[in-house]
Image (tube, rainbow, N blue to C red):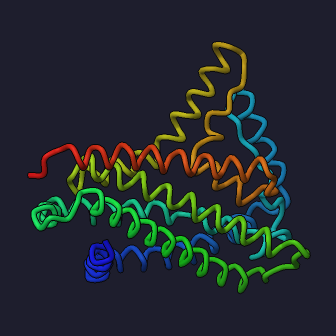
Amino acid sequence: MLHLIRSDLYKLKKSNYLWVCLLIALILGTGTIFLLDFTYKMTGDQMQAQLEQIQSEMEETGVSVTTSGIPASYEELSASSQLLSFFSGESTLLLAVVISLFVGGEFTYGTIKNLVSRSYSRGSIYASKFIVGTLVSILFAVLYAAVSTITATALWGFGTVSKGFLPDLLTGIALELFLNAAYAAIFLMFSILIRQNGGSLAANICFLEFLSLFAMLGEMLLKKLLNHTVSLSAYLPDTVMQAVASQELTSSLITRALAVGAGFMIVSTIIGSISFIRRDIR
């Protein structure tokens, strides 16, 4: 098992796409902060009114949204207030690219077939991919958050912090990394099911981009048919990540984050591992 993990890490280290995606993460982490800075400077004092209007319009259609935790003005921006949100940034998209290309390439070039022929169990092969995917998810999240925090501190200052800031920060980071690991499990599942670079990449990106959209459409449909608001999107990984980053870490929010992360991780791992164990490798 340890040999498989070392081998996977070595292959990733030698791949060009990993380093390209890491470079993109650095650029995005920096560019996003400058874009946010520009947006708040252009909006001025109208930001709070616009946020309230957006929330009101979305809730009227049955979509559950909240603007809690979003700075209402430029003066409220600081690195400390936005630090957790940096862990729920665009790194998940880059993670999808890396896992799709890595696992898909293993099938395309026959590496998986060679491993199975060398008497490695399929369970250990899948476990190795999951562990490496989790490590990569942590790497991207931490790198993105680090460069974003440095840039935000340079522009806005770190800001003042309360006595309970550090414990809440560490708890929030742990939850964000756990949810990132759940994404790694999902991306691995699709890559194992499809077994091809382009197809798995398309499926993973579609999952990222359209799952929340389908949940919002479902909420709107239920609101129209039943005149009742149902928060389907509240149990999606990206929504929970945003909630952890912007809301007070109550026991109910922590429980929801753990349940959503564990649920997606377990279901994805079961589906992916069963498919990998039972299907023939060509």
Seen in the picture, residue 226 relative to 178 is either above or below; the reply is above
Q: Nearer the viewer, residue 22 or 52?
A: 22
- Residue for point 71% across, 71% down: 83
Q: Give the number of callouts.
A: 0
Q: Is residue 15 visible?
A: no
Q: Residue at x 71, y 57 (%)?
A: 244
Residue appearing at x 57%, y 78% in the figure = 30
Q: Nearer the viewer, residue 29 or 238?
A: 238
Identity of the residue drawn at 39% across and 59% down? 96
Quarter of the N terminus within the rendering: bottom left
Q: Nearer the viewer, residue 79 or 231?
A: 231
Query: Is any atom of residue 254 visible in this view?
Result: yes
26 shown above or below 212: below
Which residue reaches farthest right?
A: 163
As displayed, is residue 132 above or below residue 206? below
Indicate the position of residue 271 as horizontal and vertical percent values. 36, 43
Residue 259, given in percent of the width and then of the height, sits at 62, 47
The image position of residue 141, as x and y in percent, is 54, 71
Out of 172 and 16, give the one closest to the viewer: 172
Residue 232, position in %: x, y?
A: 62, 33
Relative placement, left or right, of 167 versus 282 is: right
